[in-house]
Image: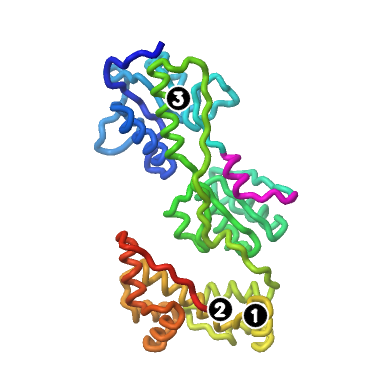
Amino acid sequence: MPRFLPTIPRVLVMISPTSQKVLREKTLGIMRYARLHGPWEIQFMDDRPFISKLETFKNWQPDGIITRESPESLAAMRACVGNTPTVFLDADLKGSRKRMSVQHDVRQASEAVAEQRGYGCAVYEPKNARDWGIEQKHMRGWLLALPKPCGLFAAFDMQAKQVLDTCLTAGIRVPEEVSLMGSDNDEMICENTIPSLSSVQSDFEGGGYLAAELLDRLMRKKVRTAVRLSYGFTRIVSRRSSLHAQKTGWLVARALEFIRLNACEGISVLDVAEHVRVSRSYTEKRFRSELGHSVLEEIQARRLERLCILLRETELPIGDAGLRCGYGTESYLKRLFKRTYGVTMRDYRKRRLQAEAGHGGLAMQQRR
């Protein structure tokens, strides 16, 4: 029979450190449930400065626990917490189903990202996970050996960033040769890589909410047999690392990489042709044939792309921003920008600031 709670329940949450985005989202789900269905007194097992820590359980005994620790790791605490109702949230249960648990269903995200077309699948196995200086050499060899083009799904965004960094040093083009997607949608990482990183937004907050709901039922003795719940993802956030890229030959691919690296340094069409060691006319012919536009248009597009970033994310004067993107004449740049985007650079920056403040946005596509 369900029982009434005699006092506000004390709940110990052991999913620290909450400095990580994923764990913050799980914690947010737990706290949202407590706010809607509590109140609960929640204590976190998190080592933060200036915050009193829960060193022992002599003076604070929990009525329920949500943890990502394994049952084996938690066993050492059993002398203190006894048979306290416990829900395992994304913990390593080693196949045991006799636990109250909530697990992330990674298969949902994997199947959503991948298209079943009968191709083979290669799984990366790290050799020195504790030493990136050694591990990157192993990853580089694995990436170079992959058939191209291919798609790659990383378990989390920081690992996807390592893949991006390794592709850059190995001369592997993303997304032209490797279309890459991470997981967790950590914007601090995804918006600050080159190219920007596509990622799966998993429903971590929903997972935390499910764990809190299950613990509430457990503390009220509404459930006695083992329950195993799961949660999936909410959306796929597409960025440049997984954009479909038109297949290009080696000459155009090499030229595009050179332009991406040097567009804002004042390079000319002749510089590009000399880099790929063919004539200017032949370079132009290959660009027209494979991309449908000229070399100069590609250079301008990359310069304007960088300029837009500077206008959105810095307070540089417009003239200084233009100089950093290779434009020596501000009057010419003003005409070019207005012709390309339909607004002035000043209005572009102003409307972007308004969008960030919640006053509406401006959606623009470059005219080519």
Secondary structure of residue under mark 2: helix
As measured in the structure, the alpha-carbon distance from the residue carrying label 1 to the one carrying label 3 is 59 Å
For residue 87, the mark is: 3
Q: Position of residue 200 (x, y in %)?
A: 52, 49
In the picture, the quarter occupied by the N terminus is top left
- Label 2 environment density (alpha carbons within 10 Å; few <14, some 14–19, many ≥20): some
How many marks do you count on the picture? Answer: 3
Q: Any mark on residue 287, and which?
A: 1
* Stretch in magenta: 106-119
| Vertical placement of residue 352 versus 335, above or below | above
Label 2 vs 1, first from the N-terminus: 1
Image spot of residue 222 (x, y percent): 43, 17
| Residue 90 higher or lower than 197, as above or below | above
Q: Amino acid at mark 2?
A: Glu
Query: Residue 176: in sight, yes or no?
Result: yes
- The residue carrying mark 2 is 298
